[in-house]
Image (spheres, coloured by chain):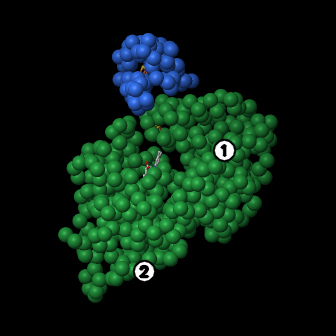
Amino acid sequence: MREVHLRINPIACEGHGLCAELLPERIRLDDWGYPLIAPDPIPPEVLEHARRAVAACPTLALALERRRH
Amino acid sequence: MTPTPTPTGAGSPPAAAEPPVGLPRLLAGVAGGGPPMDLLAHLSRHGPLPARGRRGPALIEVLERSGLCGRGGAAFPTFRKLAGVAARRGPAVVVGNGTEGEPASAKDRRLLTAVPHLVLDGAALAARAVGAPDAILAVHPAAAPAVAAAVAEREARRMDRVRFRVAVPPERFVTGEASALVHWINSGVATPTMRPPHVSERGVDHRPTLVDNVETLAHIALIARHGADWFRTLGTPGDPGSSLVTISGPVGRPGVYEISRGMTVREVLQAARGATEPLQALLLGGYFGTWLPSGEAMELRLCAEGLRPAGASLGAGVLMALGVGSCGLVATARLASYLADQTAGQCGPCVHGLAAIAGELDRLARRAGRVDLERLSRWGREVEGRGACHHPDGAVGMVRSGLRTFAEEVRLHQAGACSAASDAPVATGAGAAAGA
Ligand SMILES: Cc1cc2nc3c(=O)[nH]c(=O)nc-3n(C[C@H](O)[C@H](O)[C@H](O)COP(=O)(O)O)c2cc1C
Ligand code: SF4
Ligand code: SF4
């Protein structure tokens, strides 16, 4: 089984917070405006929103990653 | 070319030396503060590099049986790292990590300035085992002259096949992190990089790179000579061998000692002539380490199995004692501020999170008003695992252990009091230790 996870590159992320706006189901911001990502895999029904958030990140810090179960 | 370690004019080649019995191993024949052991003295003490049986791929097998784990902090099995790099295609690179950015540690400098040839032997052996034509010794500025002189001695005798280079990275805490070190060697910028790729896949000049602590390399030099069974005559079955430790704080003779893994904290402190005042706590493992009440710490064995139940590890071998006259919260806050200051400034949660945590701890230590402890521990949980390297994780772990060990002090400080006899500065560095 392969699961889809959101993965963040903390070096690239500048805390724009756009991702949290687009994907509030999975991402909230910490006290400094940097995204905290829910640890469990992305359920299929959220995948489209997750793709949109990835595409919107201005620094390409967010990626979808397939991980072995 | 087959290395012929016989120095010209030294007569017959030195015979394989008797393996050292007991302690010390790495520091055998070293007088405190004396000049570095030169090549001739080194070879007559330890003997020549071993013949075929314990070189190349065979070395990796011997290292596996020896049970040697890295001495740079993470205690990863050394054979596995070598095997990983050896399995990659193309010429590799060996990096000896002697940057020693940890302020409470002095053992790598001590090793490099006392027995540089032991480290260079280990680097040469590791280079051969992983297929590396180059080895870079990245060392603390204080050790650079001794290492450079030792490299020159070997080059004059055409002793090694590997090409050595000595490099002195900037003195920052994070510089010694493996990917930061490789980044600095490649581009002059000493900040960690994102994985993948791991340095073992793509490191220095894009080549597979083995980054090993310099003490780890020195152990390799002895294991290659004397074998896995010999290595295991010290230490415990699960955590064999000897280790260098740096002891600081109120003890009779702070400094660097070689211990057998599995010795108790009490025994190790005795080697440093014992505490000079009653102790309240010990920091085991350094700035990324674990504060423990001295009562709990004293009988702990300094090995992986012995420390695991206490949630601690030996890290890079740091033992920092704290006397009853000092405030544990002041000490914890000082360490936290230092670590917050030392972030590589790249990852938001590390930069802002550690600064916020250190700021609140500082307020707590100075009794500058009530601190929201709930929020402090939430910040800790939220910062953990969110950097490109383990810097924030190490810092948060240390802070958490401090708040646990000094829980009574926290209560007092929240009420505006402090149990310490004085708010005198706490010895938090190896300044005192480095001299011994
Ligand atoms: C922030 C940070 C700083 C580090 N500093 C050092 C250091 O100064 N020296 C060192 O040998 N390892 C240091 N390390 C560990 C290295 O990344 C690496 O694990 C080690 O050099 C591997 O050697 P070993 O397997 O022989 O222990 C550091 C790690 C981190 C996260
Ligand atoms: S949108 Fe990108 S840069 Fe902005 S917070 Fe999210 S991951 Fe970071
Ligand atoms: S986690 Fe901290 S120290 Fe590590 S790379 Fe990111 S900012 Fe630098």
User: Which SS class for mark 1?
Assistant: helix
What's the CA distance linking mark 2 and mark 1?
45 Å
For disc 1, does the CB lie below 8 Å from ligand 1?
no
Determine the chain carrying the residue at label 2. Answer: B
Side of B118 where B393 appears, left or right: right
Residue B35 marker: none
Q: Residue furthest front?
A: A1
Q: Position of residue B388 (x, y in %)?
A: 43, 36
- Circle 2: residue type: Glu
Q: Position of residue B370 (x, y in %)?
A: 74, 31
Residue placed most toward the observer, B239 or B299: B239
Which residue is pictured at 29% across the width and 53% down the height? B86
Side of B164 where A63 appears, left or right: right
Side of B336 where A4 appears, left or right: left
- Circle 1: residue type: Gly
Query: Can residue B424 be seen by looking at this rendering?
Result: no
Q: According to the image, label 1 marks what residue?
A: B402
Query: Can residue A36 be seen by looking at this rendering?
Result: yes
Which residue is pictured at 51% across the width and 70% down the height? B233
Q: Is residue B261 above or below residue B326?
A: below
The colour assigned to chain A within the rendered structure:
blue
Earlier residue among tags 2 and 1: 2
Residue B18 marker: 2
* Chain identifier, green in the render: B
Q: Position of residue B336 (x, y in %)?
A: 59, 42
For disc 2, does the CB lie below 8 Å from ligand 1?
no
Q: Quadrant of residue B334?
A: top right
Residue placed most toward the observer, A29 or B315: B315
